[in-house]
Amino acid sequence: MSKKKWSLIAIILLALILGYSYIKVSTGPIDPMGRLAFVKLANPDMYPGHPHSELLSKEAENKGSQTAMVLQMYGGSNYRSYQEGNVYIIEVAFIDTQGMGSINLSQVNFFDSLKVAIFGVPVGRYKYMSDGTVYNNYDEMMSHVNSLAREHGQKGPIPMVFKGTVREGNPIITPGEGFPLYFQILTKTYGLIPAYVYTLSGLISPYLNNPYRNFELIHASDLQYYYNHGQLNLDYKKVNTNVSKYYTQLYQNNTASYGG
């Protein structure tokens, strides 16, 4: 068979894969929006008024959504959901209890990550944190997410992003926080092929949608240094009064150790 025919077959197969994935996702309950950001601009970053939080709220509102879901890696917070403008932000973090594919923000075993990507997340490997509660399995976590969405008037699919911030290393190469959970939710919801398509396309999202992308990438090493040395932490004593209770509670949550 000639190269031209092989190329035509490859194009047809790619078109079928993309078309199938688009149809599958466009009629589903989750709207995958990809990666939100590259590095933190302030810590904590998912709270009312933060640029990344406002960005997510704006994108979700533009889609006519009343809620949005942001995925992270567990790092000590209780991951409280909150209102940002007209959109209710649902926070979910995953806790990797096995292996090194995503158990530590600064230590990644790519062979383990590849195994998870090919064969899926082993039963019992992940736990999940949202709104101060540890969920021991995926179904319990998604039940919580869907309940919150209904309570806040969600109509249509829930927009979903993974936060994507990287505390050290090259943020262009490393996909960042929440990436494994993003892939798991897509796999569980739509199957492996659409999960690959929308996970890969989701890595492009911040280049197109994040207005802070140039600043984040140019100053990535500086912002990572500032974050790791506590210089991006908010002063909880000088916050605006209308969100002071939220900041205070979040600060207390962040200083409490996880005992689950």
Image (tube, grey):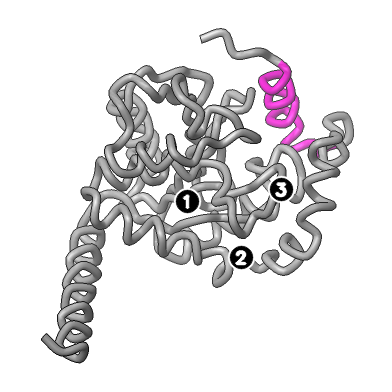
Return the residue found at the far left.
Answer: 1
**In the image, is residue 20 above or below residue 228?**
below
Residue designated by label 2: 210
Please provide percent x and percent y for residue 128: 44, 25
Residue range of the region highlighted in magenta in the rendering: 239-255
Q: Quadrant of residue 202?
A: bottom left
Determine whether the residue tagged by mark 1 lies in a helix, strand or loop: strand
**In the image, is residue 128 above or below residue 176?**
above
Determine whether the residue tagged by mark 2 lies in a helix, strand or loop: loop
Is residue 28 found left or right of 57 in the rendered image? left
Query: Number of numbered discs present?
Result: 3
Residue designated by label 1: 161
Is residue 208 found left or right of 66 in the rendered image? right
Determine whether the residue tagged by mark 3 lies in a helix, strand or loop: loop
Report the residue at 22% width, 81% height from top.
Answer: 11
Q: Nearer the viewer, residue 249 or 69?
A: 69
Asked if the residues shown at circle 2 and circle 3 are in contact, with their CB atoms under 8 angstroms apart, the answer is no
Q: CA distance from mark 2 to mark 3?
A: 13 Å
Identity of the amino acid at label 3? Answer: Lys
Identity of the amino acid at label 1? Answer: Val
Is residue 42 found left or right of 131 in the rendered image? right
**In the image, is residue 8 above or below residue 77?**
below
Magenta stretch holds residue 247: yes
**In the image, is residue 217 above or below residue 80?**
below
Please provide percent x and percent y for residue 260: 51, 10
